[in-house]
Each structure stands twice: as C-alpha cells, then as structure tokens.
Image (tube, helix red, strand yellow):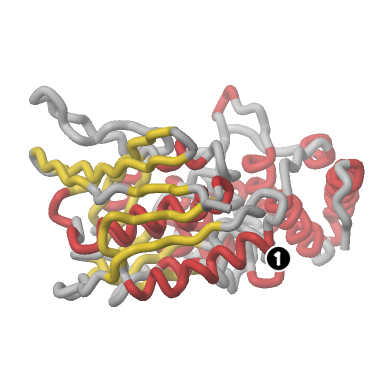
Amino acid sequence: MTQNRIVLSEPKIKEKENYVRISAILKFNGKRKELWFDIPKKFLNKEQVSSAFLNAVYIPCLAIGGKIISKGEVSPKLLSNLPTVGDIMKTWFPSRFKKQTDFVARHLSAKNPQGKKVGLFFTLGVDSMTSLMKHLKEVDYLIYVLDEQTNLYPKDGKIIKSHVPHNIEKVANLYGKEVIEIGTNLKEFAKEFTDWPSQYHGSMFASIAILLSKTIGKFYLASSHAYPSMINYGSHPALDYLFEVEGMRFIHDGAELTRVGKVKMLSEYPDCLPFIDYGCGGVHCTRHQKCIRTLLNFDLCGILDKLPQLKHGYTVNDIKNLPMAGESDFSKAKENYKELAKHPKKAHIRTALKVAMQRYKDKRHAAGYEWE
C-alpha cells in the first residue's frame, strides 16, 4: 500500500525593516497550506528554519498520517527525537493520533553556535510570572506570541504597530527585560488536527524557540501543572526537551510548585501583583473557571486583597458551578481540593468544589472514559 505523501517545502525568508517572515508550504491530501512565522530579524537562526517547520508540523501530521518529506536540512538531534514524540502522543491520545507517520529529511550540519541569552515565553499569567520571578536575574527576553494570526511583517510600506499588551511592556520596563513579539498562523492550522493546548502548544512554542536560537540558547516554558498533578498535555517534562536542536535548551519550568505554591512565591514580589492576568473580564467578567480558580488560589494564600486590579470576589455558588472543560481543569481543581483540607474555616468551599468535581467526573463517565 502506497503511503500518503506530505511534502514540506524548504522555507523562504523575506526581510523588511526589523522583521522577517519565514514561510513554508505544506502539501497533503490534495491541499496546499502556507505556514508562516513573523519574528524580529536580529534573532533569526537561518540555519535551523527547516528544523523549526518540521517540528511545527510533526504533531498535526500524526493525525493526517503518511510520510513527511522535508525539502530542507533538519537538525540531527531533532530528527532522532521526533519518533519518541510520536510514540508519546500516540500513547497519550490514541484516538487522535492513530495513523502511521514517518519522515524523510537531510541532516543539517550546523556551523554557527547557538546564542547565550535566555528567553521566557510570557503571558502575564500566574505560571509565566512565577517563572520570571524565579529566574529574574537570568532572563534577558520576554517572548510574547500573539493569540491569532496577526501580521507583524510590514506590507506596502506601512509600519506595523506593536500588539504587545501594555502590562507586558510595563513588566519588561520594571525588571529591565526586552520583549520579543511573535506572529504565526500555526495555531490556526493545527486546530484542525490537534487540540490546543492539550496536544500542541509546547511544540509550537519550541518551534519559535528554534527560530530565535541565533541569540537565545536557553528558553523557559512555564509549566501548567505541578509534578504530582501531571496529565497528558501538549507541554510536559517528558516531552518538551525532545523539541530541542543542537546547542539549545527548551526547559519545562516550575512544575515543582502547585498553583497555590506559585501564588505564595509571587506574594514575595508585590511589585508584580498588579500586572498578573488571571482571566478576569473586569466589570463584565463572566466569572469563568480560570478567574474564579485563581481568586481561590490568592485567597488561600491570604493575599486576595493585595490585587489592585481585583473587580470582584468569589462566592460558594461560583465554586459549586465551576465549569471544567477537560482533564487540565480537573487536575487544578484536585490540587485546590487538597489545599483546602488545610483550611478548616473554608470547609464549605471545599464541599462546593467537590460538587463541581463530581459533576465533571459524571460527565467523563457518561462519555465512556474510565476513571482512576
């Protein structure tokens, strides 16, 4: 039986002003998709552009199935690691990634050393803010990846304005860091074949790290879960280091702390508290799970009143009605449930959280999934 051909073109690089657009064409199942990254020109590792694109498409291609033919030269280290990435993803998500997928690529013989600077993927959330405080003296750059496929590459002589949130700029100025703004359409492409973020975000951020590795040699990606609460997820300590190329580190950071542990650490850095983004919609907040869950974390640490951006508190009903979309939300709820056992005066909150957790367990059981 002839294996489906998936062809990844050699990337093209277009430079204009301070930005470059790196693009490649992926052909599969009779389709043709242009994929791109926009990054500041001074950071681009031109040798590793094909490595970045193969890494970026590999997990989606596990769902497409076939033989990936990369026309560019790719890092031997990455090529040796990708089959393990495939094994992990197929084991974790067998219903999504069940097709045979191989790849062919020429080995890159890199001549230029990787950078010595340190970067942190940064969003203002509790996780990335904790990693910044933890590595405050070491981190040189805060890397901000735009949520949607926003063009940063100038067109028709027009100057593209920054899309970096004002508070990220404030944090960078406060702590003497430089912000790197990244645009890409990879997330939109991958949504058809993977679940974001539970199956893909680590891979995409690693691809950006590979592109930036001319200047930066070590990258931190903040952990979403603590070691005792780990679930099968798109960024994971068993997975992230497999996305590295020669001379580059891609580090899963902060998993030694629970979410409450991270908030306790942040409480020691009061200057950063006004900038933390915990998903609140302000006066129009819908009181969704991220907002309410994080307010509970701050309350358990006794610093809820230290948030100048606080627009509302939380109620027992907010906790009882806490929606959980998947295993990640449930994992964080379990963490809070264990922490609440240390707070006898909040037994009513713990009881309410148990109701929300049971509702998710019932939903999971109804969907036909086994439960531990």
Mark 1 nearby-residue class (10 Å; few <14, some 14–19, many ≥20): some
In the image shown, does 11 or 135 lie closer to the viewer? 11
Three-letter code for the amino acid on which mark 1 is drawn: Ser
Spot occupied by residue 223 in the image (x, y as percentages of width and height): 54, 62
Spot occupied by residue 118 in the image (x, y as percentages of width and height): 29, 68
Does residue 91 lie above or below 17 as drawn? below
- The answer to whether any part of residue 234 appears in the image is yes
In the image shown, does 49 or 122 lie closer to the viewer? 49
Q: Is residue 155 left or right of residue 204?
A: left
Spot occupied by residue 229 in the image (x, y as percentages of width and height): 70, 65
- The answer to whether any part of residue 208 appears in the image is no
> Residue 146, located in which quarter of the rendered image?
top left
**What residue is drawn where x is 76% and y is 38%?**
323
In the image shown, does 163 or 361 lie closer to the viewer? 361
**What residue is drawn where x is 21% and y is 74%?**
109
**What residue is drawn where x is 67% and y is 65%?**
230
Spot occupied by residue 147 in the image (x, y as percentages of width and height): 43, 37
> In the rendered picture of this protein, how many numbered marks are placed on residues?
1
**What residue is drawn where x is 19% and y is 30%?**
160
In the image shown, does 200 or 24 lie closer to the viewer? 24
* Mark 1 secondary-structure assignment: helix
> Residue 317, located in which quarter of the rendered image?
top right
Q: Is residue 149 left or right of residue 354?
A: left
Residue under pointer 1: 229
Does residue 289 lie above or below 74 as drawn? above
Query: Which image quadrant: the C terminus?
Result: bottom right
> Residue 288, located in which quarter of the rendered image?
top right
